[in-house]
């Protein structure tokens, strides 16, 4: 019996053409499914990074307001004012408008001219802290 098994094992020398084609077709199907999925994941990660940068800018504006306590009802902050509170910001053309509600004393923050604004609103609009956090 062992001799028959050895004899049949020696007679098989490789894969047939049909077997190789089946493997290639299966690999093609898997690649066709995986590549678009990975592309979507990469785009989502890039967008999340832009929004995270926008949130960091708003948080830097909060630190600025806490440290400097601006007296105006509306203050516009740029890279110049926030540079000490931020590291590694790719888009530095942003502005943050800080508005103080005179009755409650609470501040609201709006980000403008940043890549994250385009993701949460119009191209020309501003993004509030709430909109960025809800993205």
Image (tube, rainbow, N blue to C red):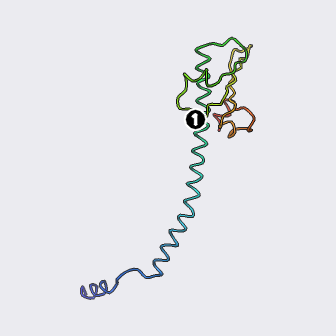
At a point 46% along the width and 82% down the height, the residue shown is: 17
Is disc 1 surrounded by few (<14), some (14 to 19) or many (20+) residues within 10 Å? few
Relative to 112, does residue 42 appear above or below in the rendering?
Answer: below
Relative side of 73 to 42, left or right: right
Where, quadrant-wise, is the C terminus in this rendering?
top right
Relative to 3, does residue 82 appear above or below in the rendering?
Answer: above
Where, quadrant-wise, is the N terminus in this rendering?
bottom left
Residue 92 pos. (x, y %): 61, 31
Residue 40 pos. (x, y %): 60, 52
Q: How many marks?
A: 1
At a point 24% along the width and 85% down the height, the residue shown is: 2
At a point 61% along the width and 13% down the height, the residue shown is: 68
Quarter assignment of residue 74: top right
Relative side of 125 to 87, left or right: right
Of residues 39 and 101, the one nearer the viewer is 39
What secondary structure is marked by label 1? loop
At a point 55% along the width and 68% down the height, the residue shown is: 29
Residue that label 1 marks: 90
Of residues 64 and 100, the one nearer the viewer is 64
Relative side of 69 to 29, left or right: right
Residue 70 pos. (x, y %): 66, 13
Of residues 84 and 111, the one nearer the viewer is 84
Task: Work out which residue is located at the far top of the displayed protein and give it.
Answer: 71
Quarter assignment of residue 8: bottom left
Residue 52 pos. (x, y %): 58, 35
Relative to 50, does residue 3 appear above or below in the rendering?
Answer: below
């Amino acid at each position: 019996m062992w001799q028959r098994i050895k004899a049949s094992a020696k007679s098989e020398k490789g894969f047939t053409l049909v077997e190789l084609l089946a493997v290639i077709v299966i690999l093609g199907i898997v690649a066709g499914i995986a590549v678009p999925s990975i592309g979507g994941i990469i785009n989502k990660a890039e967008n999340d990074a832009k929004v995270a940068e926008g949130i960091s800018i708003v948080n830097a504006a909060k630190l600025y307001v806490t440290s400097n306590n601006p007296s105006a009802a509306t203050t516009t902050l740029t890279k110049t004012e926030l540079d000490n509170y931020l590291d590694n910001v790719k888009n530095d053309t942003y502005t943050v408008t800080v508005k103080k509600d005179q009755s409650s004393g609470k501040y609201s923050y709006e980000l403008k001219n940043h890549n994250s604004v385009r993701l949460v609103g119009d191209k020309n609009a501003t993004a509030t802290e709430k909109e960025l956090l809800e993205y």
